[in-house]
Image (tube, helix red, strand yellow):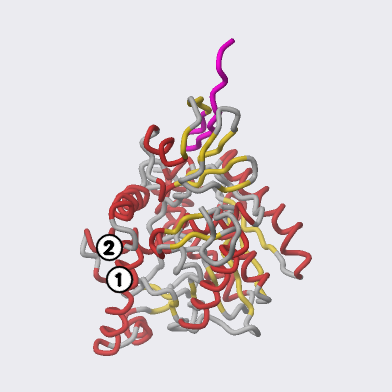
Amino acid sequence: MKCRKCPARAVLRMPRHNTAFCSVCLTEFVRSQVQKAIKSQNMFSPNDRILVAVSGGKDSLTLWEILLKLGYRADALYVDQGIGTYSQGSREKVEQFTEQIAKPCGATLTIHNVEEEEGASIPDLANLVRRPTCSTCGTIKRYQFNQAAIQGGYDVMATGHNLDDEAARLLGNVLHWQEEYLQKQSPTLPASMEGFAKKVKPLYRLTEREIAAYAVINRIDYMVEECPMSKGAKMLVYKDVLNRLEAESPGTKHTFYWQFLAKQEKAQATHGSMTETDQTTLKPCTICSQPTSTGMCSYCKMVARANAPAQ
Amino acid sequence: MMKPFMKIHLSHPTRDIEIEGPKHVRDVFQELQLIPEGYLVIRGQDLVTEDELLADSDVIEIRPVISGGSERRP
């Protein structure tokens, strides 16, 4: 199979665009999609300082690499979850990437160790507070990334969420009619009030397969192994279902999420912005001051429960 | 002498299998009941498309691209 843009051999067929690209044209395509996302969603400008949330996986390392290659000022934060050899392996990938690619561009890496800072690893914390591991992990990561962005004076925090992540999350929210979460599914979330960093998802125009192909072509050494705690996670089921639909009808994921974004934009014009909603429903946490809808935020509640004396 | 088969490395869970060739990538997907949208096929260090013919002497990695646990990552 030939590349649709040049005479070279294609390395990836992309049925949703009815095309196929060689390694050079695919690299160009992926970087241009990221640049389009940044501009069309007003994510950040070349002078802004960006904090990338990295995990050692393909999405976050690819995002960091692309931002640096495009000339943005991007540092990163890694949260060490304390999940045995999985965390050791992913931390090694992040540190290796930092030495080889990020440092020569003048970028820095900060590591937050959950076991040292919160007093127990994520699986132990999940046991202590009797909550699912993925949900405990999500609460800690969201809190720490937001905190690091605010304290470090970053203009924006960037995550590696891709089209598959967003389509799967949308499917999950729609299946359970969690309308309150739909408003938060935008590729750009504003710093709606004091204590919230602006959050962006520059990979939302790209599928996981396109991002993984970019990583392989550009020799980004990432953690292929999945987190052992994510076995049986609902998100993986939703992604599998969407990929089956995609195989039958290419472009399904793309249409599903992008049509949602178009409708969301119209709805916000009529029902008011997320900033207005946040400012009327959230107030500072009584312990840490991060915005919350209850008196104490879910992170502080969790840490308090974990540190409470055993009964 | 026994005919050599192509060697395929798979993940989630990690395992190595052998398949008789020559065979097109799309036929390997079908034989293993995998959906192409969820995987990349890597021969040596190069990606190959579904129409590529794989030989008995090839060493292949079929790498899953799906990841994610928490419903609201990072």
**Image mark 2: chain:** A
Pinpoint residue B12: horizontal percent, then vertical percent.
47, 37
Q: Secondary structure at mark 1?
A: helix
Report the magenta residues as a range.
Answer: B1-15
In this view, A18 is above or below A57? below
Magenta run includes residue A231: no
| Residue at screen point 49% across, 61% down | B74
Q: Is residue A124 visible?
A: no
In the picture as drawn, the residue positioned furthest to the right comes out as A104
Amino acid on which disc 1 is placed: Leu
Q: Quadrant of residue A186?
A: bottom left
The numbered mark, 1 or 2, whose residue comes first in the sequence reads: 2
Side (left or right) of B60 relative to B39: right
Amino acid on which disc 2 is placed: Asn
Residue at image mark 1: A182
Q: Circles 1 and 2: CB distance less than 8 Å?
A: yes
In this view, A181 is above or below A245? below
**Image mark 1: chain:** A
Residue A173 badge: 2
Pinpoint residue A229: horizontal percent, then vertical percent.
45, 43
**Label 1 to label 2: alpha-carbon separation:** 7 Å
Query: Main SS type for the magenta part?
Result: loop
Pinpoint residue A171: horizontal percent, then vertical percent.
28, 60
Pinpoint residue B2: horizontal percent, then vertical percent.
56, 13
Q: Secondary structure at mark 2?
A: helix
In this view, A252 is above or below A259? above
Q: Residues within 10 Å of mark 1 (few under 14, many from 20)?
A: some
Residue A18 badge: none
Towards the viewer: A20 or A236: A20
Could you confirm whether marks 1 and 2 are on the same chain? Answer: yes
Side (left or right) of B46 relative to A189: right
> Which image quarter is the C terminus of chain A in?
top left
